Every structure is written in structure tokens, then in C-alpha cells.
Image (cartoon, grey):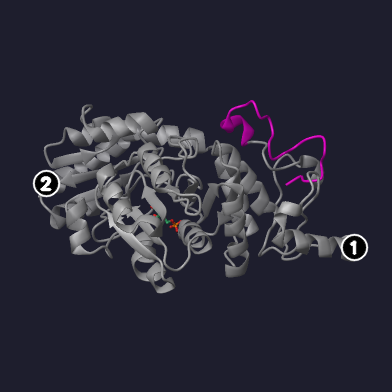
């Protein structure tokens, strides 16, 4: 917020500083609110126009944003369309995602993905996507988008040749490549630059294949797809961005035209994020760097412990990967840190995995991720229960897999908790 202040752009504040510095001030001009150091909350459904002419102009700019003058205030109309807290949190998120031209906040990660797809795709289009994806995304892709004439094709391996085969087969019908990297819950990395290169090769003047990356697990601290050439980045802000397991939210970031299109769908679909939730996300963005780094440092220690434990068959986490593996090389190339999600396979199956889940005392048995507390869950029977047996088999999602989202506790306490619970697994 702060349009109209000609001397200073709060949107683009301290342009030479790092995102962790800029995020503290971005989007909010204290002079607009009694010099309040922190952003106020604006619980209003509607906004007053200074004159009828202003009202007319604001409505006109809603549908013709390209006509807005450089210093012209686009105005606020009605909170389903826009609200100061929505604008503030979008401006803050924008500084965290280098290279993005604009950001749109949505009321959940699923709302971000579904509004993006509805806004940018049309009947007859095909999306190819990295499988597995989060269970809700899978449901959207397989059960809902086909009803609107949008076909989806899962790619079961991060191998670039699989993407190429599909591009050869479906050619110009492919409008989007959607990759979740690393994948939930198998923690498989897809090479973002290779996908972008491929999309570029198969794009033509009229048919630009958009690459959308679900960056929920790593970003914006550990992975930035836009400088690599991605068109769109989506987030569940419910996870590391909110960071305290106390809100639901989402974002899409990318090029101005695409984000404008998504914002216009958001208004009509009514996918509005309430001012208090936007305010909570704004507050959380101030500490995202600190939290994500601490969670990753803890996860590195915990993954090493799990990798050495006789009751654990395999751990999937960047720092315990074989350094020669292609997965490690992709990780090294595109990530700035390992993140905080560990998936591991316990020896045995569902019975042993459930026994571990029922015996932990400090780790909390719940789905979701990216909060301050360590969460443990069983993807095959919980978050990804809807996935077909065939899909699970192809991607190695078995009943012995457990997913841990590591929090900010003392890592030795979590290790002790897991150690004691593993002793009880028979
Ligand atoms: C990778 C990923 N993307 C999207 C979502 C959906 O986010 P939300 O629950 O905020 O709708 C999730 C939820 O767990 C997720 O893990």
C-alpha cells in the first residue's frame, strides 16, 4: 500500500538490500496510518470514493489496468476485489521472490493452484505434471479440471525424457507444465532449468507453454524458480510462509499479465483472503528466513540420526543422498539449502509405521508441514490416501513411508523422542 506517494515506492523499498531486509518495510507506508510502526488491519468490506468520478475511474482501471498512469492510484473499491492488507502482503511476498513482476494472495494453496489453472487454461488444453503431487492438487488435476475440458497427464519420473515424450505426443495442446519440486511426499527433485529449456523448445509464437512450479517445500528461502525462467510460482502459505500452523493461505507469483488474469478470476470466484489472515502472513514473512534455516539445520541432524538407525530402511533428504546421484546433483544445482521435510521408510509396513506414530510424544501426529513444531504423518493413509494404488506403486509411496516436517525445537529432543518411539516398534 502507499500508491500516491510520489517520492517513494513502498512496493520497491530499499531496492539494493536483500529480501530479508526489504520484507520488513515493503508494502506499507506508516504515514498512511498515524505512523504506526506495524501494519494495521483494515476490517472493512467497502471503501469510500472521494467523488463519483473517482469511483468510475477505479472501476474502469479494474478491467483496463494497462491504462493506469505511472503515479495514478488504482484505488480500492470492495474487499472481495482488493484490500490494503491483501496489497501489503502481496508486496512483501514480491520482495521474497526475486524476478517476479507481481503477486496474488489467495485463501489457500489449493485456491492458488485452482484459480491459476482456471484463469490461464482453456478447454482443450493439456497440463503435464510431475507425479506425485500433493493429494489435493492430484484431485484437482484428475477429477475437476477434466470437467472443464482440461486434460492432465502425470509424469512418474523426474527424467527429462519422459516430459519430452509427452511434448512430442501432445504437441501444441500442452499449455502448462506443472512441477512440484521437491515432491510431496517422496522428496523427489525435478530439474527446473531443464524443464524450462524443454518448454521453450516446444513453445511457438501463439502457444507459449507456461512452466508453473509449486515451491511450497523449499521456497522462497531455499529455491527461487523465477530467475531460472519459470513463468509462475505457487505456494501454500499455510506451510513455511505462515510458519506457525495457525492459518491457511496461498500465493501465485509471476508475470504481470498472468497475475492480473488470476486477480480478475479471484474477484469473480470470490477467493478473497481476509484482512486478519493477510496481516498474519505479513508478520510471518518477517521471520521466514530465520525459521526455515533453523528447521533445515535441525532436519539435517535428525536425518543423519534416522539414516543410521537399524529400524529405518531408507531416508530421503538431500544431505543423506548419495553425492553421485542425479537427485543430489539437481538439489545442489537449484537449492540453497535442504529444507525441513524428511521422508523415511521404516522396516516393515503400516503396522510398524503406525506404531512409531502412536509412540512419539514430542513430535505431533498431524498432517501439514512448515510450522514451528515437528509434525509426523503417514502419507499413504493420510495426505495421499486418495492416490491410486498404481500411482503409489510407480512413485514408491508405500505403507512403510513416514513423513516428518521438522520444527524449531532443540533437535536433540526430537532425536530422543524418535529413538524412544522406535524402540517400542516391534
Ligand atoms: C506441496 C503442496 N502444495 C499445495 C498444498 C495445498 O495447500 P493448502 O492446504 O494451503 O491449500 C499443499 C498442502 O499440503 C502442499 O503440500
Residues drawn in magenta: 1-23
* Distance of label 1 from label 2 (alpha carbons): 70 Å
As for residue 11 lying within the magenta part, the answer is yes
Tags 1 and 2 touching, CB below 8 Å? no
- Front residue of this view, candidates 58 and 285: 58
Q: Quadrant of ligand 1?
A: bottom left
Q: In which quarter of the image is residue 286?
A: top right
Question: Residue beneath label 2, please?
Answer: 347
For this orientation, the residue located farthest to the front is 205
For residue 262, side relative to residue 218 (left or right): right
Q: Residues within 10 Å of mark 1 (few under 14, many from 20)?
A: few
Query: Residue 419, how many percent across, how many down?
Result: 20, 39
Question: Residue beneath label 1, please?
Answer: 51
* Magenta highlight: main SS: loop
As helix, strand or loop, the secondary structure at mark 2 comes to loop
Residue occupying image coordinates x 23% and y 58%: 380
Q: Residues within 10 Å of mark 2 (few under 14, many from 20)?
A: some
- Front residue of this view, candidates 384 and 304: 384
As for residue 108 lying within the magenta part, the answer is no
Amino acid at each position: 500500500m502507499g500508491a500516491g506517494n510520489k517520492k517513494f515506492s513502498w512496493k520497491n523499498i530499499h531496492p539494493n538490500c536483500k529480501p530479508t531486509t526489504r520484507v520488513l518495510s515493503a508494502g506499507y507506508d506508516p504515514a498512511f496510518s498515524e505512523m504506526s510502526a506495524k501494519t494495521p488491519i483494515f476490517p472493512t468490506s467497502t471503501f469510500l470514493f472521494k467523488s463519483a468520478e473517482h469511483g468510475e475511474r477505479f472501476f474502469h482501471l479494474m478491467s483496463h489496468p494497462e491504462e493506469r498512469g505511472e503515479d495514478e492510484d488504482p484505488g480500492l473499491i470492495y474487499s472481495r476485489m482488493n484490500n490494503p492488507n491483501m496489497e501489503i502482503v502481496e508486496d512483501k511476498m514480491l520482495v521474497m521472490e526475486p524476478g517476479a513482476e507481481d503477486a496474488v494472495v489467495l485463501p489457500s494453496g489449493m485456491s492458488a493452484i485452482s484459480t491459476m489453472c482456471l484463469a490461464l487454461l482453456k478447454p482443450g488444453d493439456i497440463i503435464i505434471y510431475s507425479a506425485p503431487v500433493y493429494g489435493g492438487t492430484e484431485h484437482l488435476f484428475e477429477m475437476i479440471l477434466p470437467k472443464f475440458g482440461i486434460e492432465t497427464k502425470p509424469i512418474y519420473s523426474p527424467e527429462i525424457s519422459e516430459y519430452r515424450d509427452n511434448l512430442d505426443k501432445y504437441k501444441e495442446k500442452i499449455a502448462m507444465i506443472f512441477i512440484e519440486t521437491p515432491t510431496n511426499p517422496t522428496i523427489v527433485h525435478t530439474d527446473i532449468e531443464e524443464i524450462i529449456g524443454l518448454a521453450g523448445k516446444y513453445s511457438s509464437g501463439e502457444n507459449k507453454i507456461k512452466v508453473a512450479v509449486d515451491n511450497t517445500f523449499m521456497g522462497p528461502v531455499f529455491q527461487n524458480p523465477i530467475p531460472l525462467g519459470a513463468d509462475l510460482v505457487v505456494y501454500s502459505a499455510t506451510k513455511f510462509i505462515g510458519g506457525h500452523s495457525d492459518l491457511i493461505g496461498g500465493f501465485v507469483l509471476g508475470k504481470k499479465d498472468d497475475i492480473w488474469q488470476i486477480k480478475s478470476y479471484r474477484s469473480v470466484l470470490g477467493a478473497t483472503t481476509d484482512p486478519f489472515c493477510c496481516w498474519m502472513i505479513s508478520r510471518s514473512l518477517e521471520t521466514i528466513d530465520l525459521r526455515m534455516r533453523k528447521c533445515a539445520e535441525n532436519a539435517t541432524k535428525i536425518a543423519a540420526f534416522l539414516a543410521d538407525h537399524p529400524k529405518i530402511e531408507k531416508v530421503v533428504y538431500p544431505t543423506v543422498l548419495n553425492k553421485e546421484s542425479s537427485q543430489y546433483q539437481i538439489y545442489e544445482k537449484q537449492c540453497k539449502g535442504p529444507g525441513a521435510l524428511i521422508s523415511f521408510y521404516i522396516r516393515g509396513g503400516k503396522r510398524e509405521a503406525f506404531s512409531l506414530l502412536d509412540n512419539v510424544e514430542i513430535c505431533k501426529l498431524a498432517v501439514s508441514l512448515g510450522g514451528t513444531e515437528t509434525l509426523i504423518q503417514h502419507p499413504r493413509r493420510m495426505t495421499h490416501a486418495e492416490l491410486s494404488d498404481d500411482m503409489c506403486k510407480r512413485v514408491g509411496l508405500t505403507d512403510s513411508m513416514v513423513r516428518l516436517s521438522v520444527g524449531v525445537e532443540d533437535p536433540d529432543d526430537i532425536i530422543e523422542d524418535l529413538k524412544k518411539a522406535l524402540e517400542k516398534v516391534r
